Image (spheres, rainbow, N blue to C red):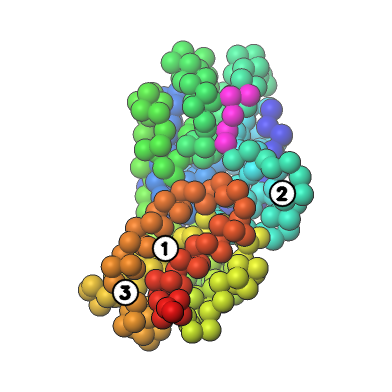
């Protein structure tokens, strides 16, 4: 039985209707393992939850959506369905539902809570997979169909992945494993090959803009530029706090003369560190891109500042700093000390962008 607290559940997104017909109509009924893959922020988890709910529903609609009325749907909405199991890293399960969603918006309160307790695991562990045994092998509610949802599947560590593989190799009947992955290439190839793989659709720019407008996002164009074609990321950007922190970050790093890495770090270190690295990556991408092709992808509204920085920065140093940010991004998932980590990153940035401050 799932012990995850109930979460706000979204309807299908407009860009998912076609894939819904294919997957709910036939694919999900003919397989014991599905892999829903695609970039972050396009609604894969919501799709998977809708699919699970509909497969468990006692009276699906003509479109094969869950009815929302039957006992099964009620249990599902309360997070107590005996035939549904959501497997997710402890770090997601412990915080509010928001952190388990695909958006990367981090709540300050969550960050504080996490800090004062034993650090919850970022991985799906072998203990979690072993704990599935009863769920998988014992008969469930009225011998009904069961669903295991694993999100994000790439968070399984190697022992967990191997333990799951055994279950996928000899699947019990009337059970569907649903794996959701942002980086499916990080999964064991043997796991991938046991799954029916579904590439989840990425909406085009016009659909994203329409949808963001319907969600009453205030500055859809800026949020879209920042989030690319990941509408849920765009919504995360639009949240007031997040947007304010982000714009403050950009304002500071675009003014090298007055920029103080240490005071900026003091404001930032409680936020999600990978998010901040990704802000800097996008910013440096634009610096690189502007200096070579004159094009700006993520910050079109900052052209003046970008032009000014590119004029004084050393292009070779900038290129190598930008390349190194890929490694920084990987390390940022588990920094030993978030404050030191950010301070070092920002100091390196200022050395590249305003070398004159460090001369003599
Ligand atoms: Zn129902």
Q: Name the residue under label 3.
A: 314
Q: Give the range drawn in magenta.
A: 123-127
Q: Name the residue under label 2.
A: 114
Which residue is drawn at the image coordinates 29% and 75% (left, top)? 290
In the rendered image, which quarter is residue 138 located in?
Answer: top right
Ligand 1 within 8 A of label 1's CB? no
Q: Where, quadrant-wise, is the N terminus in this rendering?
A: top right
Q: Where is residue 95 in the image (x, y as percent from the top left)?
A: 70, 48
Secondary structure mostly seen in magenta is: loop
Whether residue 11 can be seen here: no
Q: How many marks?
A: 3
| Left or right: 347 as drawn, with respect to 324 | right
In this view, the residue in front, 172 or 295, is 295
- How packed mark 1 is, by other alpha carbons closer than 10 Å (few <14, some 14-19, many 20 or more), is many
Q: In this view, does 348 lie above or below 94?
A: below
Q: Where is residue 318 in the image (x, y as percent from the top left)?
A: 34, 68
Which residue is drawn at the image coordinates 65% and 68% (left, top)? 266
In this view, the residue in front, 323 or 216, is 323
Q: How far apart are marks 3 and 1 (CA)?
A: 17 Å
Q: Mark 1 points at which residue?
A: 281
Q: In this view, does 185 lie above or below 192?
A: below
């Amino acid at each position: 039985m799932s012990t995850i607290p109930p979460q706000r559940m979204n309807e299908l997104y407009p860009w998912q209707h076609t894939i819904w017909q294919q997957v709910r109509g036939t694919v999900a009924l003919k397989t014991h393992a599905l892999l829903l893959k695609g970039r972050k922020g396009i609604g894969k988890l919501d799709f998977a939850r809708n699919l699970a709910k509909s497969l468990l529903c006692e009276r699906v609609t003509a479109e094969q959506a869950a009815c929302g009325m039957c006992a099964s749907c009620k249990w599902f909405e309360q997070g107590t369905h005996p035939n549904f199991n959501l497997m997710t890293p402890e770090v997601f399960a412990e915080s509010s539902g928001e952190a388990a969603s695909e958006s990367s918006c981090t709540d300050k309160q969550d960050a504080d809570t996490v800090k004062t307790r034993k650090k919850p695991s970022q991985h799906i562990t072998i203990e979690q997979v072993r704990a599935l045994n009863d769920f998988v092998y014992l008969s469930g509610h009225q011998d009904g169909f069961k669903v295991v949802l694993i999100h994000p599947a790439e968070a399984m560590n190697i022992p967990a992945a191997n333990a799951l593989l055994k279950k996928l190799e000899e699947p019990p009947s009337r059970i569907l494993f649903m794996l959701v992955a942002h980086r499916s290439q990080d999964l064991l190839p043997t796991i991938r090959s046991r799954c029916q793989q579904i590439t989840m659709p990425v909406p085009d720019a016009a659909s994203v803009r329409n949808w963001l407008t319907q969600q009453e996002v205030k500055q859809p164009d800026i949020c879209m530029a920042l989030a690319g074609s990941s509408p849920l990321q765009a919504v995360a950007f639009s949240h007031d706090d997040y947007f304010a922190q982000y714009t403050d970050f950009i304002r500071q790093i675009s003014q090298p003369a007055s920029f103080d890495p240490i005071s900026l770090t003091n404001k930032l270190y409680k936020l999600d560190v990978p998010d901040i690295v990704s802000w800097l990556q996008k910013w440096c991408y634009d610096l690189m891109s502007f200096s070579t092709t004159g094009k700006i992808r993520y910050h079109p509204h900052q052209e003046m500042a970008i032009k000014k920085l590119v004029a004084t920065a050393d292009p070779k140093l900038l290129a190598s700093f930008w390349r190194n940010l890929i490694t920084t991004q990987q390390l940022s998932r588990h920094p030993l000390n978030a404050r030191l980590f950010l301070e070092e990153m920002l100091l390196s940035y200022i050395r590249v962008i305003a070398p004159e401050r460090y001369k003599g």
